[in-house]
Image (cartoon, grey):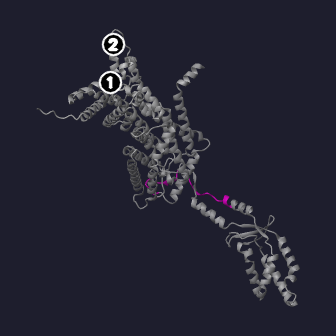
Amino acid sequence: MKDLINKLYKNHSLIYKGLLFICTTILIVYLFPKSGKFKYNFEKGKPWQSENLQAPFDFAIKKTDAEITSERKSIRNHAILYFDIDKSIEEKVKSSYNSQFHKAFSDSLSRRLSKGLHRVGKTIISELYAYGILNKTYDFSNESIIALLDGREKVKSGYYSNLIKQDDLSSIIGQILAKHDLQRFKTEFVAFFFDIIEPNLVLNKSFTDKVLQDEYDKISYTRGSIAKETLIVSKGEVIEGDKYQVLKSLQSEYESQVWSKSSYNWVLFAYTLLVALALLMLLLFLRKYRLEVFENNTKVTFIFFNIALLIFITTLVVKYDSKYIYIVPICILPLIFKAFFDARLGLFAHVLTVLLLGFIVPNSYEYVFLQIIAGIVTILTVSELYKRANLFISVGQITLIYIIAYFAFSVIHEGSVETLKWQTFVWFILCGLATLFVQPLIYAYEKIFGLVSDVSLLELSDTNTKLLKELSDKAPGTFHHSLNVANLAEASANEIGANSMLVRVGALYHDIGKMKNPKYYTENQSTGINPHDELSSKESAQIITDHVINGIEIARKNNLPDRVIDFIRTHHGTSVVYYFYMKEKNNYPDVEIDKRDFSYPGPKPFSKETAILMMCDSIEAASKSLKEPTSTKIEAFVENIINKQIEGGQFLNANITFKEIQSIKKVLKHKLANIYHLRIEYPE
């Protein structure tokens, strides 16, 4: 059991990567559309690019959405509206009319006129309740068909215009009285009937909706069928009208058949294999070419997270409306990876992500081509992301490439520019604007994942930062030395194509540990008193080497990034404090001196940048001892110091070549010659 636990602990990093790989694969497969993939790509109004297509099986031609919508609208317009009628209300109104008529009209009326008015009143009631009176006004067309229900029995049919609205009572009463030449009694009749008339019709919404839904359910979603082996479309034929609908029907039928219950697991398994294969290629790339990144679980998580996030966003857009697919700023991915890692990793991850998105998006070949080209342009054009102008220029170039490539594809498909979808160019512009969001995104990622970009390095290179100002105050000589080293290191890095911004920041902070005991370092000794005179060689060497450990502590306390702390740890490698080592040997010639007591703790430089700093630091510090420097002396001086470092194996872990070291030597010689203002020696 103990051995198992030890084994798990020893391999915990690989186990984590395995779990991350499995979880990311499952998530991406889950995001994929749950349908089969039709193997042909086609667009309405564009030529058929593949060979002649025959029906692989019998299938029905589906109606278009417009046809279905039209049928539903027709059914809705001709649907019957069902109203519940209460017959007892008419009898109740008639009874109230008979009992209250004489109270409402003056007894001074003649008997004959009174009988006439009474008879007309009954006629009004009969007219009003011929179909019935609505309890409220409904928003229906007057031509809508209605049916009156008494319980479950249909009593009468007609049109909505036959029904009486309460707002129309006055005008209807006036019309009936006009027929009998009794308009002068309109006011009395209206006032009288408003008191006794009651509505007797209520819309039966549930029954009306049920009948309407039954009619909707009868709609056929197909029209006609295509027999197996029937020629559907020929190569080069323009896809439009019925041809397009037949192809859409075949695509739908094909995908539904592929993603059936019997083959669901197989298709899911195939998707999982392809996604796992793509992610495995990424892990293998990191393992072989970016071992530092591969061994850092945080960085691997960051890479997988960004790939999954972009696939998730693209999936959401496709599900909403695939015409907006080009608004998704895919080029943010290589921008972010280049900012935190390098261009090669950024492009590799971008290509794999775009290939995975090919399963989701329509017109996958066109989409993949556009996005890969845009990714390459992103990698080639974006440099020094911390300069705002560079980002704007690069985004403009990316947008232009999108537009040019899409224009070319459209002309190839259409054969002309007349049918070009100009609104797609707007989507590309919006995509470019969205890409500018990379700056705040990089800042957020730095805080969340603890990574460092060139933007942060630019901030750290400001000599007015709290830590550098403190170094300037406590150890002015060391600060000046650091500035000189930074200039030398930056020039050397530019010469061999290393990260000049990173090495400059590393050079500025590499000696911050000297703030703890500044007077023990010659560059800070302005009084001529050397405190090492009162110490043994071992004690002096210990104080000198301790500035590395002290520097790491100060850096961590001030939250400097690990990439910068690496320069503090490695800038002396495992070299020996030679002065005090030789002094100890001279003082005790008969005693075997342990070099480890006079050596720096290491580790050795493990990158081009840290190797550059070691060279520049040694050269700058030792150059102060040059007396009457000449070109010959400087060349021999630089060669001697760097060759000793090579012989000491200080650069064995750094991926730096002899050719690059020679280039660095050349830069350092040139820079030192400029520092000492060497001139041609004129004869006397």
Q: CA distance from mark 2 to mark 1?
A: 26 Å
Q: Is residue 347 visible?
A: no
Extreme residue toward the left, this view: 684
Q: Is residue 184 left or right of residue 71?
A: right
> Between residues 272 and 157, which one lies in front from this camera angle?
272
Q: Nearer the viewer, mark 2 or mark 1?
A: 2
Q: Is residue 187 left or right of residue 14?
A: right
In this picture, which residue range is highlighted in magenta? 215-238
Q: Is residue 19 visible?
A: yes
Q: Is residue 268 left or right of residue 544?
A: right
> Between residues 316 and 566, which one lies in front from this camera angle?
566
Q: Residues within 10 Å of mark 1 (few under 14, many from 20)?
A: some
Q: Which of the labelled discs sits on residue 328, or is there none?
A: none
Q: Which of the labelled discs sits on residue 587, or is there none?
A: 2
Decide: is 467 above or below 259.
Answer: above
Q: Secondary structure at mark 2?
A: helix
> Between residues 136 and 523, which one lies in front from this camera angle?
523
Q: Is residue 397 in the magenta section?
A: no
Which residue shows up at 88% across the image and 79% down it? 99
Q: Which of the labelled discs sits on residue 645, or is there none?
A: 1
Which residue shows up at 56% across the image and 24% down it? 8
Q: Secondary structure at mark 1?
A: helix
